Image (tube, rainbow, N blue to C red):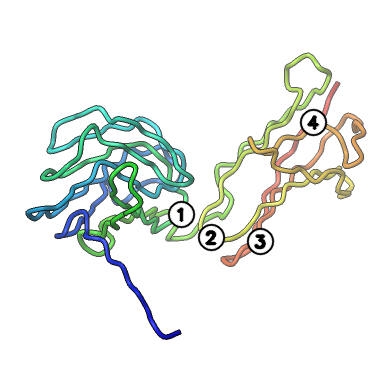
């Protein structure tokens, strides 16, 4: 290689953009209203921006947009992968921007990273925290320990007779302090024999009273075991499901 050619685009906001999120401390997996504040430092000739992309830990509800302190209607609000994309009604070239939204946080020290851009153009400019951890959400209950498997909600009664009532057992839970790890959900009879490995069907774990071969099991009590192996440790929780016809 004899030559290297580098191309630099002018920054959208030459003085940079800093951010801060409120509140900084929240409860584990609780639906929380956040306000994400972007403070650009504009200089003469800056292009400005009309799109904000914020990395969020879970899907978002109830988005409110403020420009220069005044509530305005966004041109569009969409989820793009794991990020919230908000298109502003017009290009911002001199005001701060606040994006208010609801979401849930399940991991401590969750960074709400962000970028600004002009819709339809490839250039994105990163946003940096106004100060250390200014754009990070903390969950004290996760940081100080506790269960890795939380919010366990398992149907206690399963009657798979096709009447539309209790025809399936839903198995819900959330994982805390886990960067990498997959929970395994299994059903056991009272002798300790595993009769079913339950897969996540995309809308959560559900059991329909059948074994791994698809056969309907005999009425009785069964144990639902939720087990997790992750870099922070191992844990399992158990719940009883009564199968009846």
Of all residues shown, which one is farthest toward the top?
A: 163
Residue under the point 42% across and 53% down: 141
The x and y percentages for residue 55 are 39, 50
Image position of 221 (left or right of 18):
right
In the foreground, 166 or 98: 98
Q: Are the residues tagged 1 and 2 within 8 Å (C-beta)? A: yes
Q: Nearer the viewer, mark 2 or mark 3?
A: 2
- Mark 3 secondary-structure assignment: strand
Residue 120 placement: quadrant: top left
Residue for point 45% across, 84% down: 1
Residue beneath disc 2: 179
Q: Which residue is rendered at x = 46% and y = 54% of the image?
A: 107
Q: Is residue 113 above or below residue 72?
A: below
Depth check: give the residue in front, 109 or 98: 98
Front-most of residues 212 and 228 = 212
Name of the residue lying farthest toward the bottom: 2
Q: Which numbered disc flags the more N-terminal residue, 1 or 4?
A: 1
Q: Is residue 66 left or right of residue 142?
A: left
Whether the residues at callouts 2 and 4 have beta carbons within 8 Å, the answer is: no
Which comes before the other along the chain, label 2 or label 4? 2
Which SS class for mark 1? loop
Which is nearer the N-term, disc 4 or disc 3?
4
Q: Position of residue 191 (x, y in %)?
A: 89, 47
Structural distance between the alpha carbons of marks 2 and 4: 30 Å
Which residue is denoted by mark 4 in the rendering? Answer: 208
The mark found on residue 70 in the picture is none
Position in image of residue 194 (x %, y %): 86, 48
Q: Which of the 4 image quarters holds residue 211?
A: top right
Q: Residue at point 43% right, 42% down?
A: 104
Cα distance, mark 3 to mark 1?
Answer: 16 Å
């Amino acid at each position: 290689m004899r030559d290297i050619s580098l191309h630099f685009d002018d920054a959208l906001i030459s003085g940079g953009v800093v951010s801060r999120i409120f509140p900084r401390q929240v409860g584990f997996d609780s639906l929380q209203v956040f306000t994400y504040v972007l403070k650009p430092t504009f200089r003469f000739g800056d292009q400005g921006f009309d799109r904000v992309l914020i990395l969020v830990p879970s899907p978002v509800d109830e988005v409110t947009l403020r420009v220069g302190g005044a509530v305005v209607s966004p041109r569009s609000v969409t989820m793009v992968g794991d990020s919230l994309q908000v298109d502003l009604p017009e290009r911002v070239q001199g005001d701060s921007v606040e994006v208010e939204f609801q979401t849930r946080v399940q991991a401590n020290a969750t960074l709400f990273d962000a970028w600004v851009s002009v819709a339809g153009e490839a250039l994105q400019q990163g946003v940096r925290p106004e100060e250390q951890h200014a754009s990070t959400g903390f969950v004290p209950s996760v940081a100080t320990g506790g269960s890795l498997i939380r919010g366990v909600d398992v149907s206690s009664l399963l009657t798979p007779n096709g009447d539309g009532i209790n025809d399936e057992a839903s198995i819900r839970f959330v994982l805390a302090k886990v960067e990498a790890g997959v929970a395994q959900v299994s059903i056991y009879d009272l002798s300790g024999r595993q009769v079913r490995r339950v897969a996540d069907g995309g809308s959560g774990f559900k059991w329909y009273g059948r074994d791994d071969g698809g056969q309907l099991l005999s009425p009785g009590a069964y144990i639902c075991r939720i087990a997790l192996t992750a870099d922070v440790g191992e844990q399992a929780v158990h719940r009883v499901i009564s199968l009846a016809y």
